Amino acid sequence: MERRKALGLIAGGGAAAAASFTALPAFGEETGRSTGATRRGTTAAKGGHTFALDRNVERTPVRFKNRYGITVAADLYVPKNARGRLPALALSGPFGAVKEQSSGLYANEFARRGYAALAFDPSFTGESGGTVRDVASPDVFTEDFSAAVDFLGLQRTVDRERIGVQAVCGLSGMALTAAAADSRIKAVATASMYDMSRSMSRGHEDSYTREQRQKVVDHLSRQRWTDAEKGTFARGSHEVPFDENGEVAPSNRVLPKTLPADADPITKIFFDYYRTERGYHPRSINSTTAWTATTPMSFFAFEQLTNIDMLAPRKALLVAGAEAHSLYYSQDVQKKAPDSIDLAVVPGADHVDLYDRKDLIPFDKLDAFFTKELA
């Protein structure tokens, strides 16, 4: 499968806690595996987490509302026996993932290092609210980060002047956009950053021609008539591919149920995370199904990172793999605001490695960044 066609199927993302939130029953049980290890068992498949909870961290399921009134589901991670007010991070991503996957793993690690860390499901996905399921909105997803800051700033264990954001993959563009518009976010870091608006409206490496962009718009517009007539919301590719004849060729799954023998390298790395015990989760769109077929419409209409210059004097750190097909997104964003944004390239890492490969994710560098910027 030709590389750009493949990318049309996949994108890129207790006692110490405060009394001001409502705790909910946790999903699954911990297995007692080694601290911070990626779980390769059946707990995640039953709705639990894809990683083991650190023995020095407490995790509490919570809920809060964004300014549109949508309930956002999250897990709050705090170090056990924490004292005083903690620096805090809001975390989400990748695009199509849930809090029990990569963002939760990051939150677990940051809590181990002394942060209050809130990993959340974006609106309409996972356990979060929203009547239509699995629809993405760059506006609402950007708002979810600010709503997470609202929640964190109300916790008595959190120093509201020391709140940052960490995002992975496709939610990274929304996190940077949120930070540019919300000065309560004192610092932001990303891993394997994707600009989903650019990706959906222009294709990988801006490969869509003007004619292809129009074909995608026409396809999405016709799909709206189909959905309206049927009273349902069809599933389809959020990054719309083209066939050999140059016609739109959407799929109703992000990833295939089984990996083809001739699968391209990018499909393989995503499949190895979302469709195996390594990262599979039944609520993850990427693990099980696809977004609503008309999801790309709002990404055509909503350009992210337009006001990234407003981030200054605050700072951002973008982490990307040297072998990642998405590296150019981080490089291009860093060029837009070189005085505010630093880029850290991880040798030998591909895009998905930074989801859960703790031997490759530069947590020491991320911790040092937030320690300095949230001081």
Image: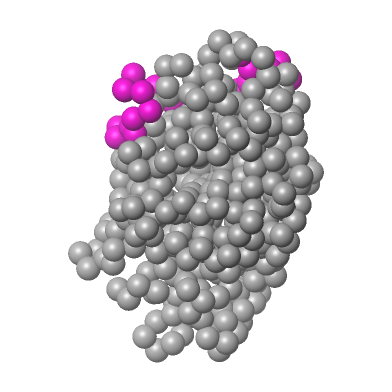
Q: In the rendered structure, does residue 36 fall within the stretch colored magenta?
A: yes
Compare residues 207 and 361 and report the one nearer the observer: 361
Q: Give coordinates of residue 179: x percent, y percent.
A: 69, 49
Q: Total marks drawn?
A: 0
Q: Going 57% across and 26% down the picture, which residue do you hit?
A: 115
Quadrant occupied by the C terminus: top right
Of helix, strand and loop, which mostly describes the magenta segment? Answer: loop
Quadrant occupied by the N terminus: bottom left
Compare residues 36 and 220 and report the one nearer the observer: 36
With respect to residue 65, does 57 lie above or below? above
- Residue 34 at least partly seen: yes
With respect to residue 271, does 113 lie above or below? above
Q: Quadrant of residue 233?
A: bottom right
Q: Is residue 118 left or right of residue 353?
A: right
Q: Going 44% across and 70% down the picture, which residue do you hit?
A: 8
Q: Give coordinates of residue 357: x percent, y percent.
A: 35, 41
- Residue 140 at least partly seen: no
Q: Give coordinates of residue 229: x percent, y percent.
A: 66, 70
Q: Going 40% across and 89% down the picture, which residue do you hit?
A: 245
Q: Going 58% across and 65% down the picture, which residue do you hit?
A: 335
The magenta span reads 16-44
